[in-house]
Image (cartoon, rainbow, N blue to C red):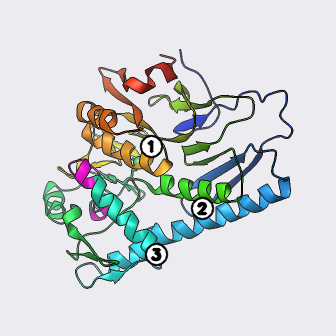
């Protein structure tokens, strides 16, 4: 059975009936940041509505500012400046960006290099952000693989240096998660007790939705072109993020190539078709969904199971049939419609 849901996101919120004693309808706002569609919903009726609206304004501005620092597409961002100085000089970066880069280096180590923010030039070679992505020349892939890996990034005393002039950083693997956590922090700082921030389908829920013990999050069916759901997860609160091979891909000679690259080969990872991660925050969920997608079902599930506070669903496809592997702690909280 497949459940239909009108929004075409990767992980979807099921807005279930509000409790009888809810005082006010949720306050909801959508916004477009440069690359990202964001939706903010506040369920806290104890905070006056004009204060909620003002907090949402601050939340959107703060997410925009963070995107402006981390996107590789705007010359003035910290990441674009670093890329422009690759092979030339170390760049002093803001403390929050320094810490972020440090976290990505740690994650790369922890995932045996599966998560790698130095794949920017390879991503451009495949053309995943361009109109016509294509399979590149194998020699060109091999050439660029010499300039990837977290050892290319040297972090010292608040400065960052990219060793090779051809190496490009790309934070796309956790871009939405990072913004979502920032948005949630701004709302919580404004005293809001319960809400949801979603960006391009990744999300974080905090507090308790009035009248409900858990949040119900839909997981998109990876092979339904209409964006129907394959199942529903229940969480108390936290981040949920999905990486799927249906998000950005092209088909060449009958083979599907998606936007998540295996850093060992420089070729799109293909052992998973969808990975959903549940974690305490959205950054972690978003970074790990990409890493697990690359690692594949066995090593990926081992990583989920050994990471405290993390649960996940890994989907693979064999002879047109979808297989779902659910982590131990999620089995009682995930309902599949298949
Ligand atoms: P997601 O949809 O969260 O899996 O993020 C995919 C994006 O992460 C891609 O569009 C790239 O910008 C970036 N990316 C691709 N492969 C990797 C990788 N192995 N490690 C980290 N980031 C990656
Ligand atoms: Mg991700």
**Is 162 displayed left or right of 230 in the figure?**
left
What secondary structure is marked by label 1? Answer: loop
Outermost bottom residue: 89
Which is the main secondary structure of the residues drawn in magenta? Answer: loop
| Closer to the camera in the image, 68 or 2 | 68
Give the x, y percent position of residue 98: 38, 71
- Kindly check if marks 1 and 2 are in contact, taking CB atoms under 8 A apart as contact: no
| Closer to the camera in the image, 115 or 125 | 115
Q: Which residues are magenta?
A: 108-121
Say which quarter of the image contains residue 58. bottom right
Crowd rating for badge 2 (residues with CA inside 10 Å; few <14, some 14–19, many 20+): some
Residue hosting label 2: 33
- Residue 77 is tagged as 3
- Residue 141 is tagged as none
Look at 60% across and 61% down and name the residue there.
33
Disc 1 to disc 2, how far (Cα)? 19 Å
Give the x, y percent position of residue 91: 34, 82
Look at 74% across and 29% down and name the residue there.
211
Residue hosting label 1: 247
Q: Is residue 258 magenta?
A: no
Q: Is residue 117 magenta?
A: yes
Look at 29% across and 51% down and name the residue there.
115
């Amino acid at each position: 059975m497949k459940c239909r849901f009108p929004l075409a996101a990767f992980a979807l919120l099921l807005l279930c009936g509000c409790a009888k004693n809810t005082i006010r309808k949720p306050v909801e706002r959508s916004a477009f940041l440069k690359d990202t569609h964001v939706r903010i919903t506040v369920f806290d009726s104890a905070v006056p509505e004009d204060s909620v609206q003002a907090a949402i304004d601050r939340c959107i501005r703060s997410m925009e500012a963070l995107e402006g620092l981390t996107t590789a597409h705007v010359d003035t961002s910290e990441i674009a400046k670093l890329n422009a100085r690759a092979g030339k000089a170390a760049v002093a970066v803001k403390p929050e960006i320094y810490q972020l880069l440090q976290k990505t280096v740690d994650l790369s180590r922890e995932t045996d290099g599966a998560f790698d923010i130095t794949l920017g030039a390879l991503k451009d070679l495949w053309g995943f952000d361009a109109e016509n992505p294509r399979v590149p020349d194998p020699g060109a892939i091999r050439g660029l693989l010499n300039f990837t890996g977290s050892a290319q990034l040297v972090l010292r005393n608040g400065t960052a240096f990219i060793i090779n002039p051809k190496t490009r950083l790309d934070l796309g693997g956790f871009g939405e998660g990072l913004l979502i956590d920032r948005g949630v922090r701004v709302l919580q700082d404004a005293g809001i007790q319960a809400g949801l921030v979603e960006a391009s389908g990744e999300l974080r829920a905090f507090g308790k939705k009035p009248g409900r013990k858990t949040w119900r999050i839909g997981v998109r069916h990876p092979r339904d072109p209409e964006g129907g759901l394959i199942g529903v997860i229940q969480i108390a609160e936290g981040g949920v993020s999905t990486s799927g091979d249906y998000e950005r891909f092209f088909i060449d000679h009958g083979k599907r190539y998606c936007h998540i690259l295996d850093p060992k080969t420089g070729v799109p990872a293909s052992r998973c078709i969808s990975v959903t991660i549940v974690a305490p925050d959205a950054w972690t969920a978003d970074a790990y969904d990409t890493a697990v997608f690359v690692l594949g079902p066995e090593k990926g599930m081992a990583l989920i199971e050994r990471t405290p506070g993390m649960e996940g669903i890994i989907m693979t496809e064999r002879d047109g049939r979808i297989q779902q592997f659910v982590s131990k702690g999620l089995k009682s909280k995930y309902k599949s419609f298949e």
